[in-house]
């Protein structure tokens, strides 16, 4: 089902003419309201009047996370503070958070796009949404919350954490849609198991998971253990929060980007050159309706690919492939580039393992050493040492053969890897310490 038929299934030509009009308005607005953009545009020798077609977008300079940091906290807002009704922030791994602002209208737009997302992923008005994304500065909790309300579903604002209580509420309230990070979904399932509660007896039909990278193999594992259909939702605070793109339940073939609000591009992360549809690279977004915090050509660092063909669900908006990793997550181990999600795929394809792992990178002398910590279950852990060792060697071989990288595998006892209530920590990089 489609929440906003008009905009989600609009003929491309009509959509593109709306995009151009909105882009021109946004560019004029940021040029006049935000000294940062005026300076940047002047440096690039471009003025709002130069944007005459959508391809002129390429004349505009990129915006990066460093620009946001330099203007911390509110320097890039394009409206006076008395028009800002909400502030969110995303905690970076280092230093200050990235701060974003919303006007009342921005919040309305976000609610609409989240309503579209939830419906695309299979949510209906009579569903009960168990929303275990964190409420607070993180955009996940409140983003889903407003969307579920806009759609007319019932929302349980449980937030993350206190997992046993979550399981009790799942049993008693009978929610039908679960929203949280994929890693937390697995953790909830594990705690439910310990409490003697099976997901087969719960009422979930779908889970709408995002906010962290996850592989196709992880999706299958979640679908198996939680007995629901696992849908992928993408977004980032800077651009809005969750609801920038989402899979549709009909085709589940890439994530539909709400192009009447965001213009996506894919660029070569090294040269900045715009790449054609179908070529993988770094996702760049320009927001064309946001008021408080418009972003021009924001480099997300997320790696994906765009597919323009219309989907059989009827949506005409472009689709992006599952996020393949972040360019700044890429590990270079003795010259070989690897993304944590690729290791995850190999782990999940090798039998024996629990879906809990962590990658540790160390520098020994001048060489990087990658250690893969993977959990095994109770039964296996009490197995003979030599069997465990042969399982370790098997995974090492699979990683080497699939990714061409030498890793050391260490099996970890059950629960040996820390569980997350939000975004899982998959990589521990000891090289900078
Ligand atoms: O994680 C917003 C969100 C909340 C998305 C709930 C989906 C669900 P940030 O905290 O700013 O915002 O983190 C954004 O998370 O640049 C990606 O690297 C990663 N990410 C988000 N969704 C996905 C996904 C939210 N479906 C950063 N797959 C982004 C892979 C994702 N990575």
Image (cartoon, rainbow, N blue to C red):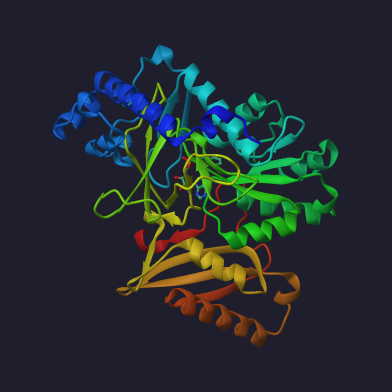
Query: Residue 165 at x, y = what percent?
Result: 77, 41
Residue shown at 77% from the left, 38% from the top: 175
Residue shown at 85% from the left, 54% from the top: 196
16 on left or right of 116: left
288 on left or right of 6: left
Q: Outermost residue toward the top?
A: 82
339 on left or right of 190: left
Q: Quadrant of residue 38?
A: top left
* Position of the C terminus by quadrant: bottom left
Q: Outermost residue toward the bottom?
A: 386
Query: Residue 227 at x, y = what percent?
Result: 76, 54
Q: Is residue 420 visible?
A: no
Q: Is residue 371 above or below residue 104?
A: below
Q: Quadrant of residue 79?
A: top left
Query: Residue 302 at x, y = what percent?
Result: 41, 50
Q: Is residue 195 above or below residue 116?
A: below
Total labels: the figure holds 0
* Position of the N terminus by quadrant: top right
Q: Is residue 336 above or below residue 56?
A: below
Q: Is residue 299 above or below residue 88?
A: below
Query: Residue 394 at x, y = what percent?
Result: 57, 82
Residue shown at 75% from the left, 41% from the top: 166
Q: Quadrant of residue 115?
A: top right
User: As rendered, which of 405 and 8 lies closer to the eye?
Assistant: 8
User: As rendered, which of 202 and 256 lies closer to the eye?
Assistant: 256
283 on left or right of 148: left
């Amino acid at each position: 089902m489609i929440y906003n038929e008009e905009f989600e299934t609009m003929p491309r030509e009509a959509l593109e003419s709306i995009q151009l009009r909105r882009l021109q308005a946004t560019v004029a607005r940021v040029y006049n309201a935000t000294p940062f953009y005026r300076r940047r545009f002047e440096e690039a020798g471009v003025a709002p009047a130069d944007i005459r077609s959508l391809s002129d977008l390429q004349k505009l300079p990129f915006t990066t996370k460093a620009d946001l940091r330099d203007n911390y906290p509110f320097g890039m807002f394009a409206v006076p503070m008395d028009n800002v009704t909400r502030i969110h922030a995303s905690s970076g791994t280092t230093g200050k958070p990235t701060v974003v602002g919303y006007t009342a209208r921005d919040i309305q737009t976000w609610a609409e796009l989240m309503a579209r997302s939830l419906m695309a992923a299979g949510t209906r008005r009579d569903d009960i949404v168990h929303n275990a994304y964190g409420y607070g500065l993180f955009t996940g909790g409140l983003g889903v919350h407003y969307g579920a309300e806009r759609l007319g579903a019932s929302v349980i604002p449980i937030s993350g954490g206190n997992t046993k209580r979550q399981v009790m509420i799942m049993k008693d309230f009978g929610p039908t849609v679960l929203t949280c990070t994929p890693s937390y979904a697995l953790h909830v399932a594990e705690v439910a198991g310990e409490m003697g509660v099976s997901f087969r007896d719960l009422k979930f039909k779908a889970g709408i998971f995002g906010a962290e990278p996850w592989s196709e193999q992880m999706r299958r594992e979640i679908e198996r253990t939680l007995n629901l259909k696992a849908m992928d939702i993408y977004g980032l605070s800077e651009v809005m929060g969750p609801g920038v793109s989402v899979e549709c339940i009909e085709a589940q073939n890439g994530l539909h980007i709400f192009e009447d609000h965001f213009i996506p591009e894919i660029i070569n992360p090294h040269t900045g050159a715009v790449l054609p549809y179908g070529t993988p690279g770094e996702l760049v977004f320009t927001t064309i309706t946001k008021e408080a915090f418009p972003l021009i050509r924001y480099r997300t660092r997320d790696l994906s690919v765009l597919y323009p063909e219309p989907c059989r669900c009827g949506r005409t908006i472009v689709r992006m492939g599952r996020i393949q990793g972040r360019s700044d997550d890429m590990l270079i181990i003795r010259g070989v580039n690897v993304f944590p999600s690729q290791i995850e795929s190999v782990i999940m394809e090798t039998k024996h393992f629990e879906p809990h792992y962590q990658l540790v990178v160390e520098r020994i002398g001048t060489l990087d050493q990658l250690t893969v910590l993977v959990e095994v279950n109770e039964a296996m852990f009490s197995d003979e040492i030599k069997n465990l060792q042969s399982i370790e060697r098997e995974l090492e071989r699979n990683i080497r053969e699939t990714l061409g990288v030498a890793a050391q595998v260490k099996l970890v006892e059950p629960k040996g890897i820390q569980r997350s209530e939000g975004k899982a920590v998959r990589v521990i990089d000891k090289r900078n310490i």
